[in-house]
Amino acid sequence: MEIPNREILILRLLTTFHLNNVERILFIDNPITLQEIEICIQEELNKNLTFPLSVNDSESFEGYYIKKLDNGNFELICQRNHPLNPFKTIEKLNKKYTNFKKLIIDYLDKEFNFNIDGIIVKK
């Protein structure tokens, strides 16, 4: 089984929140860095206006996502509904950022606590 390159695995981890055991081996001795995540998300935002790409303004999304604004700034958006009452919102956030690094730090902290599926992100 051929393992995809590191950048592809980081993107997969950020979008699916999971890697298989063989893929995880790459990150045991060489943890993911904040800079790698910044680069990965920036590249995706240059292609699309949202990260993760599965987010679309016209559909419901649970959790945090990043939106690139027309003026070049960014917005961190979150919505979570109550598990027993999907019509009740229990968490909502719309925060604008001019500093991309601060945005990424807040995103990783709020959505993953710097631990994505047991894989630590070095701050």
Image: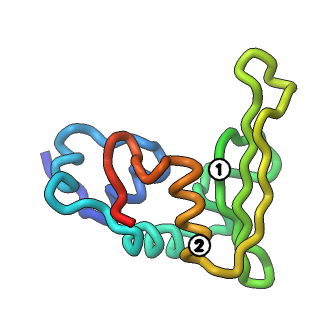
- Residue 106 is situated, as x and y percent measured from the top left of the image, at 59, 61
From mark 2 to mark 1, how far is it between C-alphas? Answer: 15 Å
- Identity of the residue drawn at 22% across and 47% down: 23
**Could one spot residue 3 in this view of the protein?**
no
- Identity of the residue drawn at 19% across and 62% down: 30
- Residue 46 is situated, as x and y percent measured from the top left of the image, at 59, 77
Q: Give the structural element (helix, strand or loop) at label 2.
A: helix
Label 2: how many Cα within 10 Å (few below 14, some 14–19, many 20+): few
- Identity of the residue drawn at 44% across and 75% down: 39
Of labels 2 and 1, earlier in sequence is 1
Label 1: how many Cα within 10 Å (few below 14, some 14–19, many 20+): many
Q: Is residue 123 above or below residue 4?
A: below
Amino acid type at circle 2 is Lys
Amino acid type at circle 1 is Tyr
Name of the residue lying farthest toward the bottom: 71
For label 2, the residue is 102
- Name the image quarter holding the N terminus: top left
For label 1, the residue is 64
Q: Give the structural element (helix, strand or loop) at label 1.
A: strand
What count of labels does the image hold? 2
Q: Is residue 69 left or right of residue 104?
A: right
- Identity of the residue drawn at 65% across and 55% down: 65
